[in-house]
Amino acid sequence: MNTTNTTPLRGKVALVAGATRGAGRALAVELGRAGATVYVTGRTTRTRVSEMGRTTETIEETAELVDAAAGTEGAGIAVPTDHLGPAQVRALVDRIDRVHGRLDVLVNDVWGGNHLLDFDTRMWDVDLERGLRMIDLGTRTHIITSSVALPLLVRRPGGLVVEVTDGTARSNQDYRENFYYDLTKNLPIRMAYVLGEELKAVGGTAVAVTPGFIRSEEMLDHFGLTEATWRDGIDKQPHWALSETPQYLARGVAALAADPEAARWNGTSLDSGQLAQEYDLTDTDGSRPDMWGYLLAERAGESPAVSDYR
């Protein structure tokens, strides 16, 4: 008889800040599949579009996907929220407190700054307002959300904060090709460390996580591909062979959230390949890509084979 608990997060409440698309959407869906009630937030709704200008993904759609994964209507709750507005975040957290009286998992995945990126451009050649907007979107949002939500999360021991970023402490030692992007993606790693130090005294845990080369909706559009045709992009970008679906990281985070020993990761930063290895998970096609492991091997002067990292 199979005694595996398929809903280890039943009764738990999660907030995924920045769940419109990509990793955030997948994280919300997998947390819902594991049994959690998931609040999904973002700026793009069926009646309003964020500055990214994408109309094809909305937070309402994410909530419906959570419902479908959980098999329960209302498992996903969409709340339009601009996480740069403290008043909006307070209203969101007050609603969670009023309805549930608890918050068990906080996922800070707000980003939405890819349209601001100027790679291979020196700091003084980047428009200052573009750079500061990137920092606001990718770091100030995380700080505001944590500041407002943590008093509810720490009300019960065992709370988990997940900072979603690009890279880990071990992989982000190299220059990230843009001053503002480098700062934006390194600060959440430090946030996880500092919050981990503060949370451990009250039985909480904070970690930073990163996908590898993620095949988000936006990235597939950038390459002119679909999930069915993604392999056609390998000729344009060899590392694309090690790309992964958003579900890959999400599966790892859901397993981490359900792990009674999750505190052993407190203050650390983990990539999707590490999580998959630790929790014996695969991507949707049954593979186990490890892009960051591959890049680290390249950095060390090795000539790794792609087939050894997928």
Image (cartoon, helix red, strand yellow):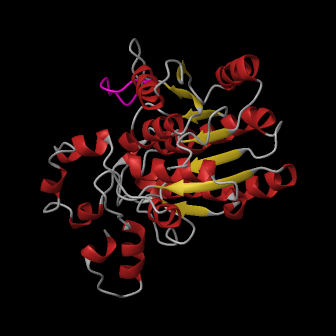
Is 55 covered by the magenta stretch?
yes
Q: Position of residue 147 (x, y in %)?
A: 75, 37
Q: Which residues are magenta?
A: 51-59
Q: Position of residue 168 (x, y in %)?
A: 53, 64
Q: Residue 84, located in which quarter of the rendered image?
A: top right
In the image, residue 197 above or below residue 219: below
Q: Please tell me which residue lies in front, 1 or 143.
A: 1
Give the percent coordinates (x, y) of residue 81.
Answer: 56, 23
Position of residue 176 measured from the top left corner of the image (x, y, whole percent): 44, 63
Relative side of 130 to 142, left or right: left
Residue 198 showing in the rendered view: yes
* Dominant secondary structure, magenta: loop
Near-viewer residue (169 or 155):
155
What residue is at 49 percent from the left and 43 percent from the top?
134
Residue at image x 53%, y 28%? 40
Q: Name the residue furthest top.
A: 47
- Residue extending furthest toward the front: 1
Q: Residue at x 72, y 22 (%)?
A: 100
Image quadrant holding the C terminus, namely bottom left
Quick check: 169 left or right of 46? right
Q: Is residue 177 magenta?
A: no
**Is residue 164 visible in the rendered structure shown here?**
no
Decide: is 270 above or below 128: below
Q: Is residue 168 above or below residue 87?
A: below
Question: Which residue is drawn at the image coordinates 75% and 56% (left, top)?
Answer: 196
Outermost residue toward the right in this view: 201
Total numbered badges shown on the rendered structure:
0
